Image (cartoon, rainbow, N blue to C red):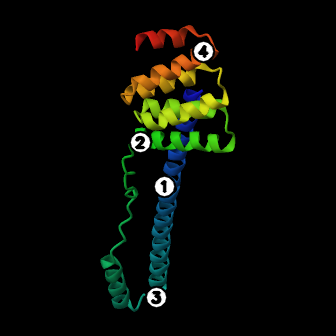
Amino acid sequence: MLNNRLEDLIIIYRNYKIKKILNTLSTSVFILLFAISGFFIYETLIKVSRKKVDKIDKNTTKVITKVVHIDKNISKPKVKLKPKIKPLPKVDEEKVLKKNTIKALMLVEREQPTYQSSYDLAKYYFQHKDYKKASKWAVIASNREPKQEDAWILYAKAKVKLEQKGIAKKSLKIYLLKYNSQKVRNLLNSL
């Protein structure tokens, strides 16, 4: 279940990245179109001014040569067809996914506090080596569904990692007094 949520978050993050790239590209295309239209307007103005010069009486050829000479010296604006796009900053996808995963799990826990939501949080913290929080959420999960052995096992493993084997053994023995589970018995014997 945690993997499905993680995959959903990955898809959401990738869609966000695509939208961001498309937004940047659309801005670049707009700038490019604006520059090209400016270039064509400039060319049109030059053509109109040359037609006006051609209409001047042929007797005034000196004026025509001077105007034409000035037109030749006018420099055309340089149009860059490839706008410079700044590269996106490098993002550590693992950090983003980790941050988004914990936010999503906490949101689910706040919206619908269930055994599964608290167990997912315990499992997440255990995988990320935060054993105190893992044991806290495992206790919450086991209080919601006392028969479920997975939360008890995760609690015991977290306590072992915190170097509290005595507490881990005691919790497994309490579970075995109420419920029969081979997995719990095997873990207790391995401690």
Amino acid type, label 4: Leu
Q: Earlier in the sequence, mark 4 or mark 1?
A: 1
Q: Identify the element where label 3 is drawn.
A: loop
> Could you tell which of marks 2 and 4 lies nearer the N-terminus?
2
Mark 4: give few (<14), some (14-19) or many (20+) Cα within 10 Å: few
Depth order, front residue of 30/125: 125
The residue pinned by badge 4 equals: 177
Which-is-in-front pick, marks 2 and 4?
Answer: 4
Cα separation between marks 3 and 2: 72 Å
Give the residue drawn at x 64%, y 16%.
178
Q: Is residue 21 above or below residue 147?
A: below
Q: Residue at x 36, y 88 (%)?
A: 61
Which image quarter holds the C terminus? Answer: top left
Q: Which residue is label 1 attached to?
A: 24
Residue 105 is drawn in which quadrant? top right
Give the SS element for disc 2. Answer: helix
Disc 2 crowd, CA 10 A, few/some/many (<14, 14-19, 20+):
few
Q: Residues within 10 Å of mark 1 (few under 14, many from 20)?
A: some
Q: Which residue is mark 2?
A: 95
On residue 56, which mark appears? 3
Nearest to the observer: residue 172 or residue 50:
172
Indicate whether 8 appears above or below 27: above
Q: Secondary structure at mark 1?
A: helix
Q: Which-is-in-front pick, marks 3 and 2?
A: 2
Report the side of 161 relative to 11 (left or right).
Answer: left
Residue 154's disc number: none
What percent of the width, then of the height, locates residue 31?
48, 63
Task: Compute the Cα span from label 4 to label 1.
Answer: 63 Å
User: Counting residues from the N terminus, which is met first, the one under dot 4 or under dot 3?
Assistant: 3
Q: Are marks 4 and 3 in contact (CB under 8 Å)?
A: no
